[in-house]
């Protein structure tokens, strides 16, 4: 079965960077997009960006342009999302999701809580 | 790219039907049949319930159905059950290859 397993919770100081991993199994990693979605406590879902694991092509929401980088290591079927210049408003649960051109998130990771606090 | 508009909350009694709306614009919902719906229980990851406006993934109850008219998509849940109480989010393709997806603000469904 399809599984997306994310790295554990992180606590970062303002101005730092965080890199969250998402290890895929149960399907061909390079055949589906990886989307990243975040959710602040008590808030809604916010799409951050996508990556094509085959080509490495990416697209980011304008809000995160310049601060987010999505990469992958195909040899270990793992996607990464790095967010820099962290501020308190970035405190949220970050999800990776397997998607396609017709749906951004067929399957979801378990989420990674990133807390930004001085 | 603005978030799609959903009602903050809806409610219904067991056995009833409810509909959640998702209003976008002619640049997203109105132009593409690429609306999806997600169910999220507290503390859990979201789950895909509907994609391409009205298609159900394998394993999703046929009590869940989707439709679209103009710039507004809708999710209908019939035969409401206690386990349906959750947050629901719509999502639409927004016409950009670099920034393709936009979510709605979410709707809290309460089963009375």
Image (spheres, coloured by chain):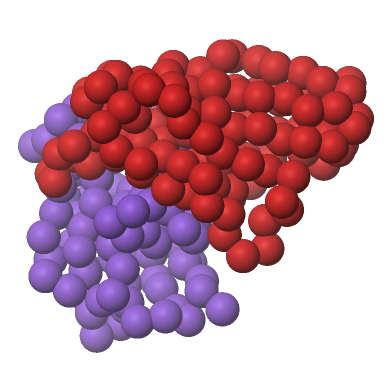
The picture places residue A86, in percent across and down from the top left corner, at 25, 33
Q: Quadrant of the N terminus of chain A?
A: bottom right
Image label count: 0
- Examine the rendered structure and indicate whether residue B7 appears above or below residue A53: above
Q: Quadrant of the C terminus of chain A?
A: top left
| Foreground residue among A100 and B105 | A100
Percent x, y of residue A15 = 21, 32
Residue B90, how many percent across, how many down?
48, 33
**Residue closer to the observer: B48 or A85:** B48
B98 and B95: which one is in front? B95
Vertical position of residue B2 compared to residue B40: above or below: above
**On screen, residue B106 above or below A37:** above
A2 left or right of A97 in image: right
Left/right of residue B65 with respect to residue A64 in the rendered view: right
**For residue A29, what is the image quadrant?**
bottom left
On screen, A38 above or below A118? below
Task: Give the x, y percent position of residue B86.
Answer: 70, 33
Q: Residue shown at 24%/85% (left/top)?
A: A75
- Indicate the chain coloured purple by its letter: A
Asked if one can make out residue B4 in the rendered structure from this viewpoint, the answer is no
Q: Colour of chain B?
A: red
Tell me what residue is drawn at x 42 percent, y 53 percent: A105
Q: Residue furthest bottom?
A: A75
Residue, x 78% and y 23% (percent of image)?
B110
Task: Please say whether residue A4 is visible from this viewpoint.
Answer: yes
């Amino acid at each position: 079965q399809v599984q997306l397993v994310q790295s554990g919770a992180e606590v970062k100081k303002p101005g730092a960077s965080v890199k969250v991993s998402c290890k895929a199994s149960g399907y061909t990693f390079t055949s589906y997009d990886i989307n990243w979605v975040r959710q602040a406590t008590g808030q809604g879902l916010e799409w951050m960006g996508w990556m094509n694991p085959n080509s490495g092509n990416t697209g980011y929401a304008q809000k995160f342009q310049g601060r987010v980088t999505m990469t992958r290591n195909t040899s270990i079927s793992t996607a990464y999302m790095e967010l820099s210049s962290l501020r308190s408003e970035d405190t949220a649960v970050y999800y990776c999701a397997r998607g396609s051109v017709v749906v951004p998130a067929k399957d979801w990771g378990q989420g990674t809580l990133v807390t930004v606090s001085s | 790219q603005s978030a799609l508009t959903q009602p903050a909350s809806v409610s219904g009694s067991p056995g009833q039907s409810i509909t959640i709306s998702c209003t976008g614009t002619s640049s997203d919902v109105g132009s593409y049949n690429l609306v999806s719906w997600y169910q999220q229980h507290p503390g859990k990851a979201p789950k895909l319930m509907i994609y391409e406006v009205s298609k159900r993934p394998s394993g999703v109850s046929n009590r869940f159905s989707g439709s679209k008219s103009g710039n507004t998509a809708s999710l209908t849940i019939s035969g409401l059950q206690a386990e349906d109480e959750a947050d629901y989010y719509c999502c639409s393709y927004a016409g950009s290859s670099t920034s393709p997806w936009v979510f709605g603000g979410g709707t809290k469904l309460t089963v009375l």
